[in-house]
Amino acid sequence: MHTDTVAALDIGGTKIAGALVDGSGRILVRAQRPTPAQEDGEAVMRAVTEVVAEVSASPLWPSATALGIGSAGPVNALAGTVSPVNVPGWRGFPLVERVRSATGGLPVTLVGDGVAIAAAEHWQGAARGYDNALCMVVSTGVGGGLVLNGKVYPGPTGNAGHIGHISVDLDGDLCPCGGRGCVERIASGPNIARRALEGGWAPGPDGDTSAAAVAPAARAGHPVAVASFERAAQALAAGIAATATLVEVGIVVVGGGVAGAGEVLFAPLRRSLQDYAALSFVRRLTVAPALTGTDAGLVGAAAAAAAALRDRDGPAAVGG
């Protein structure tokens, strides 16, 4: 196996991370900045450029053969642009062109963050050994990616498997994407917290109003906190069941910050799947927590870049 290094960027509504990743999926160098999500597009790009500059300052940088980007979506891999729902300053933003310039012309591969996580989990995580899988991130947003017939399937524009914007409530709230009743509008971390606060849950002395703070309250049996997680699990189950029915995946891997709540989320998710995944070929669907942790986006972006090199030049280093 070759041991070339691949650079990676993981861009989300909360953080922008960068790394150099070797052929075994090991992160050699890393950098991170908060995402200035409510500022203009150039402010967000400056944060990306700072991350790239920090990573490229490493003496290992000359060994990098390509760069992969896993970005919150939707993305357009054909045009090299991104329009993340949670980053309003980027609409049709030419991210690939700008990153290519910042790296001195490295080949750049763009995929949605859910596709990156699918690549990471299929290579290194809970979906390893499965030919058909749905891998999800439940965090500030809800994303997903598909493995079909043994390969990560990004789709023509890099968005395939974007389960967060499947509608599961026809008369539900308007989602920032323009749809109604989307999985993300119900199951994302901010929406779990919003629903708990509206129902009367109160944060502790530290004032933390995130889903991470709602989780221990749910674990302790606070009825409003429990109900908010159960509603999120129901939305996830409906989206998962629809996806599994459509493409017959054998496993669903769930990662992201909200998945860190553990059984507070997974127990009601498995129960709700019994209601929604009713057909014989989806009843045995396995649900598992992701294993690649907070580095999934970086590892998966690197794997996507290496796969693009492999398709172009033959066997590649990372994830090959």
Image (cartoon, rainbow, N blue to C red):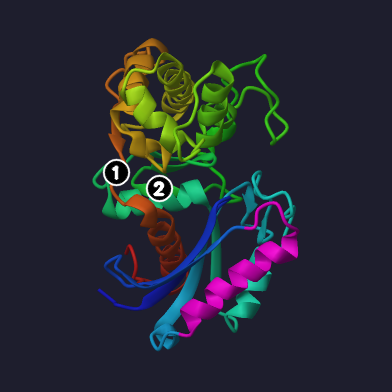
- Image quadrant in which the N terminus is located: bottom left
Residue 313, horizontal then vertical, whole percent: 43, 74
Residue interval drawn in magenta:
36-57
For label 2, the residue is 118
Residue 230, horizontal then vertical, whole percent: 42, 19
- Any part of residue 142 in sight: yes
Asked if residue 40 lies in the magenta stretch, the reply is: yes
Which residue is at 51% across, 35% downward? 209
Decide: is 37 above or below 107.
above
The reply, left or right, for residue 289 in relation to residue 169 is left
Which residue is at 54% across, 72% downward? 51
Q: How far apart are the alpha carbons under marks 1 and 2?
A: 8 Å
Query: Mark 2 or mark 1, which is nearer the start of the sequence?
Result: 2
Is label 1 in contact with label 2 (beta carbons under 8 Å)? yes
The amino acid at mark 1 is: Ala
Q: Nearer the viewer, residue 39 or 98?
A: 39
Q: How packed is label 2: few (under 14 Cα within 10 Å), some, or many (20 or more)?
A: many
Magenta region, main secondary structure: helix
The kind of secondary structure element at disc 2 is helix
Decide: is 211 above or below 27.
above
For label 1, the residue is 127
Residue 141, horizontal then vertical, whole percent: 54, 40
Asked if residue 155 lies in the magenta stretch, the reply is: no
- Any part of residue 265 in sight: no
Q: How many marks?
A: 2
The kind of secondary structure element at disc 1 is loop
